[in-house]
Amino acid sequence: MINLVPLRAQSVSIGRKVAWDETGAAGYINPRQLIEAQLIAAQTRGATVIREVVASLEVHGDEVLIRSREGGELRAGKALLTTGGYSNTLLRRKLDLPTKSHTILLAEVSPEQIDGLRGMPSIISSFAHPEVESLYMLPPVRYPDGKTYIKLGPSSRDEQFIDARDNDRELLPWFQSDGNALTATDLKAALQRMIPYLQVLAYQTVPCLITYSAHGAPYIDALEAGRLYVTTAGNGMGAKSSDEIGRIGALLCATGEWRSDLNREDFRAVYADGGSK
Ligand SMILES: Cc1cc2nc3c(=O)[nH]c(=O)nc-3n(C[C@H](O)[C@H](O)[C@H](O)COP(=O)(O)OP(=O)(O)OC[C@H]3O[C@@H](n4cnc5c(N)ncnc54)[C@H](O)[C@@H]3O)c2cc1C
């Protein structure tokens, strides 16, 4: 167990451990609010949001035909595919997109305890446990169900690769499960160790996915004949950079140009058959 000591831009050693406490503008991004803000920004600039599930995506000559499960049909000059772990379900030639199960734990905090936890930082920690290599933990956040939870997630050795290649039914059993029970037990132990006085009202486990690329950077690339583009494979780090990944991908799709000072080659799509374009 180590204690965090408030320091700016330097570390503190406690025994053989080192802790960094980042003050100032350090914090966390609420993913639901991030997506809401991104949708508002897109709609303000003229985008139309269609809340349907894409069933197929086909390039025919100079158009992309998009059919939805709800029966909708769209013909577009170009399309940008951004469907995360579901990307391969819509692609003829599959991407190298290993997708790993990930279990998170939500610990419900009582309203009386929330005030006392206001100063709690977001934590990333190594955790000497046989199954959990490291973890992250967020301070209490209010969720859409009106309850407030501390969220923990591990980097676990016991999670499984589940690659959805042909259709999203391959992911259903995982998403209909309660996640990995062993991971949840380890996370509960870690939480109790880090905040021993915490009284948890109830625990929930949530099954999630993390999608990886072959080279560790996201895929931002043109696929079929310049009609179909892709931004996918966040490697567990895509949220914080999603504005910029989306900007580069959208401009590549709209103009055919790579408008970034990052090296385009670092973001090439790699296919499951080993090839790039
Ligand atoms: C538990 C957890 C914690 C994470 N923590 C962090 C973090 O701290 N920092 C960070 O930067 N990143 C984090 N990540 C990673 C980050 O969430 C991802 O890298 C990022 O969300 C990937 O963005 P994406 O747009 O490619 O895919 P997604 O966010 O998965 O979005 C894909 C979208 O496509 C939609 N979709 C899928 N199939 C279809 C279809 N057929 N038709 C229509 N829509 C479809 C889905 O509904 C979804 O809205 C975390 C991920 C997990 C699971």
Image (spheres, rainbow, N blue to C red):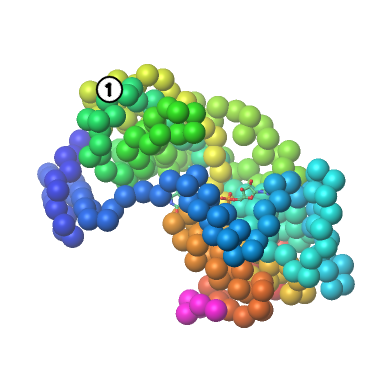
Residue 96: in sight, yes or no? no
Q: On the picture, is 275 further left or further right than 101?
A: right
The quarter in which the N terminus is drawn is: top left
**Looking at the image, is 64 positioned above or below residue 212?**
below
Q: On the picture, is 40 further left or further right than 183?
A: right
Residue visible at 45% across and 28% down in the picture: 146
Q: Nearer the viewer, residue 57 or 175?
A: 57
Q: Nearer the viewer, residue 232 or 25?
A: 25
Residue visible at 47% across and 26% down in the picture: 204
Q: Does 260 appear in magenta?
A: yes
The quarter in which the C terminus is drawn is: bottom right
Furthest-right residue in view? 61
Q: Position of residue 12 (x, y in %)?
A: 13, 51
- Magenta: predominant secondary structure element? loop
Kind of residue indicated by mark 1? Glu
Q: Does 70 appear in magenta?
A: no
Residue 80: in sight, yes or no? yes
Which element is circle 1 on? helix
Q: How many marks?
A: 1
Q: Position of residue 255 (x, y in %)?
A: 66, 78
Residue visible at 49% across and 33% down in the picture: 144
Q: Position of residue 232 (x, y in %)?
A: 60, 59
Which residue does the numbered mark 1 point to in the structure image? 112
Q: Residues within 10 Å of mark 1 (few under 14, many from 20)?
A: few
Q: Position of residue 67 (x, y in %)?
A: 82, 52
Q: Which residues are magenta?
A: 259-263
User: In which quarter of the view is residue 131 placed?
Assistant: top left
Q: Nearer the viewer, residue 52 or 262?
A: 52
**Looking at the image, is 31 positioned above or below residue 241?**
above
**Looking at the image, is 160 positioned above or below residue 274?**
above
